[in-house]
Image (cartoon, coloured by chain):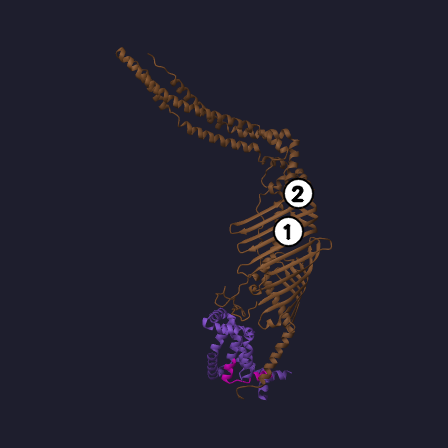
Chain colours: A brown, B purple
Amino acid sequence: MQRLFRWWGLAAFVAVIAVLALLYALFMDSLLRHVIIRSGSTLVGAKVDLAKVELHLLDGKLILKQLQIANARAPMRNLLSVETLSADLDVQQLWWRRVHIERMQLLGLQFDSARTESGALPGVKPSGALELLPQMAQFDWQMLADKNGWEKLFDDLQLDSLQSVAALRTELKTAETDFKQRIAQLPTNEQLKAYENRWQQIAGKAQGSQLERALSFVSKAKELDALRRDVKAELAKVKALKSQFETSRERLQQHYERVRSAPERDLAQLLAHTSVDLPGTDKLLSNVLGPALNTRLNKGVDYYRVAEPWLNKARIVAGQHPDAPPPPARFAGLDVQFVEQLPQPLFWLKQAELSGELHWQQWQASFEGLVSDVADRPELVGEPSRLQLKASAQSGGDMQLLIEIDRRQPELSAALQLKARAIRFRDLALAETPALALQIEQGLLDLDVSAQQQPALSELKTTAALHDVQLRMSSNSAERFAQELVAELAKTTAFELELYWRKDAQGEQRSLNSSLDDIAKAAFKRVLSVRIAAKKAEVKAKLQARINSELAGLQQQWGDYAALENILREQGKALEDMSKRELKR
Amino acid sequence: MLRTLFKFFVLLNSETSPWQLAFGAALGMVLGLTPLWSLHNVLVLFLLLLLRVNISFALLSMALCAGLAYGFDNQFHALGWQVLNAPMLQDLFNACYNIPLLRWAQFNNTVVLGSLLVSVILFLPFAVLVRIGISAYRRHWQARFEQLKIVQLLKASRWYEALSRMETGA
């Protein structure tokens, strides 16, 4: 036994364990801090900073101090930052390698706070922004910068008169084709000649005795009656067609006269600013607001994207094929799950209390919230994960947020409701293009956001009502027209925005509506009308010249159509003459 | 202090028979092939200290095998996956899964189980191979090795002199 064992080795083993325990006591907190930073950065795709970690295993207490999670898309901002995070762990569950947090407190929570240094990770690209807004026809604001910008606008107007010319052209073409087909069914020249030949035969001098000549006359009279009947039948067809042709020609003539007088009507409508339809003017301002709105919406989407990989984490159960082999690193591999006698989630955050400050466009509010039942196996918890947040400001305004994420079924479903009322904000930039810049210096906001994620459906609806608004608008256009338009729009004190996005099996729908568009369009028409009124005669002459030019192109077509009447007239005359002929004794 | 440390170092290297070196290397192999911070390595460490095996050789073997293990992680994972999903062993694994200590031993991790199985299977053959290798070295190569200039330089150094004195003293 002496040769096999060295008994002092037992003391050495105890000494090694003691040294390890000492190292744990000295360095465990630092090691845990590095693990949290490394795994957090990998999950988020941006830097995670953590000042201090305190782990008291025997008490089941974990404390994190000054946690900052950077925003991958805006590296100088944090997605969120927490002053102190303290968690009470269930020590009994730790024996089973489960982390159950009975209660967590997050104090000093802030969203979108500034960082002192960039939180970008080298070589990591943030995921692309979602296109939540529809593609809209562009209105060329730059055109207003041209010297005669408004005149060019006028050239592009979709006026009734021009549309009427197009309609007339089509109608004329259709009528010509139709009558040509029907004329083709009338007796041809050969048929008329045949009738003539029959007449000649009937009218030929009779031969023979007086009796024979008398009998021949009777027979010829009968033939003449038959010929007359045939000719009259053809004549009736021709007359009917001629009557229809005359009606059609009269109608087309009236249409023609209406088109010729259209410029007068167009001018009246322009002056009454009721018919101004240019590409893009339907969504004059929505187009300008679009990019800024898309950016703000994607900020919210970023929070979901950070949580998404963790929410959709796959579990490897015995008997199920693994997703992929592990990376070639030590301590990797897959943990296979087996049947537990008392099944429990491996991770379960039962309840977390949040409190902090919310800052948005100089609106400052304190908030409190509760997160409950976040677990890796929600089917064992029996409840969906929830986040409830309430914020209120001393200066007025309040906000309520409720998010529910249900992973108890294989397919994830989630719902979000956000209500904000009377948020008094300042300096909100809605558009920052040189052609048209729009900033709200101050205003009151009421906001409703609802979103849902179902297995076959994603939907987002946002309604924002802004009132008591002070707008500041500017354009780099030197054109007075543009400046007048901007001045009109800047008088707005209230408007609404509505965004809808939906994706399902049928496809994707997006719409953006804004009452600012109606305001802008009305202002646009008013300013344009004033310009047109000042140059009434000139505008009318221009419109008339355009119409005359279009109508000149119709002359050939009109001539071809009118020529059909000649054909009918000639045929009718020939048949008429033939029907009146008498036999000579 | 330095003297105590040297004494400790000499003690570590006092087991120099071929079998002591071989089993030391085999235990080191287990430490090297399997993830270091696994619970079963506490038992391996205990055996390493309790049994009269050469600890330095064990540490050397551990370092070499740890380097090799990086290239075999996928194979360990594949083996571990096959074993953990073997139908005839499911009842056993279900029972083990409900014992907290075995959970901490991470028996249900594919790389841990796969590498442990490989190191257990290779334990005796590895020890025998090392034993044969050491005997062959001592018989055929040791004399030539000691003739090398670098070895002579090392032997002439103060450190080696001090070590020899310690050994003699021990």
In the displayed structure image, the side of residue B47 where residue A220 appears, left or right: left
In the rendered image of this protein, does residue B34 appear above or below residue A266? below
Q: Which residue was labeled with disc 2?
A: A476
The numbered dot on residue B67 is none
Residues tagged 2 and 1 counted as in contact (Cβ below 8 A): no
Q: Nearer the viewer, residue B66 or A563?
A: A563
Q: Nearer the viewer, residue A160 or A532?
A: A160
Q: Position of residue A460 (x, y in %)?
A: 59, 52
Q: CA distance from mark 2 to mark 1?
A: 34 Å
The residue range painted magenta reads B8-24
Q: Position of residue A51 (x, y in %)?
A: 67, 66
Q: Which residue was labeled with disc 1?
A: A448
Residue at horizontal 37 percent and vertical 21 percent from the top? A229
Residue at horizontal 47 percent and vertical 31 percent from the top? A174
Q: Residue furthest right?
A: A394
Q: Which element carries disc 2, helix, strand or loop?
A: loop
Q: Is residue A122 visible?
A: no
